[in-house]
Amino acid sequence: MKKILFAFLIVFTSIKAFSQAQDQKIYEIIESISETRIEKDIKILANFGTRHTLSDTVSNKRGIGAARRWIKSEFEKISANCNSCLEVFYQKNFFEKGTNQRIVHDVWVNNVVAIQRGSKYPNRFIIMSGDIDSRVSDPTDFTSDSPGANDNASGMAGTIEAARILSKYKFDSSIIYVGLSGEEQGLFGGKGLAKYARDKGWEIIGVLNNDMIGNIKGVDGIIDNRTFRIFSEPVPPTETDKERLSRRFYGGEVDGISRQLARYIHKTVKTYMPEMNPMMVYRLDRFGRGGHHRPFNDLGFAGIRIMEAHENYTQQHQDIREENGIKYGDVVEHVNFNYAKKLTAVNAINLASIAWAPSAPTNVAIGGIVEPSAKLKWDKVNDSNIAGYKIYWRLTTSPTWDNSRFVGNISEFTLEGIVLDNYYFGVATVGKNGFESIVVFPSEIIKK
């Protein structure tokens, strides 16, 4: 008996130590993000003069062509430093004049893609994106200076910096770092890559779209360098009539795949960066506006938008000028590089956590009608590195998963004394390394 107990303690201690080592890697990632490099990259992007989608593609100093070639060269440098660990390429999309009112001449909308393949699941992806293009007041003006320092050199610089740091690690799943073009003309870059992903059969866990992560002073006068917003839609637009009917009776109107991704990010940040204030916004995007996660949502992929909490509209989509003592224009002087560093870290630790985590359970079902208990059942993941599964639950009015129980490496469990009617439930897979998958909300009912 003593020998068995001693062996158990050794195994337990080893698992605990390994988990702590993995946790430490997350802190190492946070500490490795460089404010200096992010500042340098933002300035380089802003100094291309304009990055308008329809701007010059020939010059090496000005225009969208020079900008995307520079981004590609940065990804290639990163790859060279990690023994060619990144697959770097242009994903190209052609649009004719008149596609919409903002496409005033034929144009190639070229995304810059860098794929860091996972060792176990090379066709399963978590994506971080930033927008390459910029604009002034007139969305068809492709010649005027449009530095786009915050919108969106900040998000693009953050994406490049995340690639620099995470390329030093090995992951089970693949990570994609991408500069998307054509956002200001109608989300064309995102549409092109989302379709490309669908046609290639990519399994996308989620898209972290970064659009404006460098401003801390709002037009309302609030200065805040810790709060940021996570926008997520409630349910996928691709849900079926059957799924919609099921929601009416069983709930889940705020539990779609993008909302679960938002909750995952919230939890990771509160665990590793407690000084930050992640603000989940229950909306696809800002009122009446759009971002590059939307095209992925449109095809049924999980995707969210990470951005500053307090915007300054005098510094967005504006001609550079001064009127009535107000300086208009999206210039470098308005960017807070330390804040951009923090939000880059937010992305990097979530990319790493998800890429180190096992696959999520499938076919999660729930039952327990008119019983003082909640029954959950799911299909186990075929992976020898899984420690087991964790059941989460929360009050129906709570935005976050507030309660959880690890139940071991099994495929069903009953929570005694937890009344099904009062809570929402979900299940996540837990790896032996301590990392968890995104929570899966039940989509089926257990039949007696």
Image (spheres, rainbow, N blue to C red):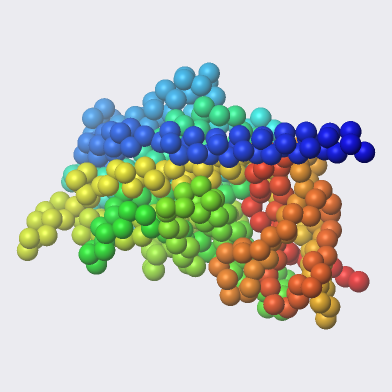
Residue ID at (65%, 39%): 19
Q: In this view, does 411 lie to the left or right of 50?
A: right
Work out whether residue 63 can be spotted.
no
**Residue 205 appears in the picture as rendered:** yes
Which residue occupies the foreground of this view, 427 or 43?
427
Q: Which residue is depicted at the point 24% across and 67% down?
A: 220
Question: In the rendered image, which quarter is residue 117 located in?
Answer: top right
| In the rendered image, the vertical position of residue 152 relative to residue 122, given as above or below | below
Residue 420's x, y, as percent? 75, 74
Q: In which quarter of the image is the N terminus?
A: top right
Residue drawn at the location 58% of the way across and 43% of the way down: 353
Residue 446: image x %, image y %? 84, 68
Q: In which quarter of the image is the C terminus?
A: bottom right
Pick the front one: 364 or 356: 356
In front: 131, or 341? Answer: 341
Question: Is 213 placed left or right of 440 in the picture?
Answer: left
Q: In the visual, does 186 lie left or right of 252?
A: left
The image shows residue 439, relative to residue 82, as above or below, that is below
**Relative vertical location of residue 277 with respect to residue 80 in this rendering, above or below:** below
> Where does the image place residue 357, in percent across and percent down from the top left?
65, 42
Measured from the top left, where is residue 237 in percent x and y? 58, 64
Q: Quadrant of residue 164?
A: top left
Q: Which residue lies furthest to the bottom in this view?
A: 370
Total marks shown come to 0
* Residue, far front: 2
Write the residue at 83% across / 81% down: 370
Can you name the residue that lies furthest to the left here? 324
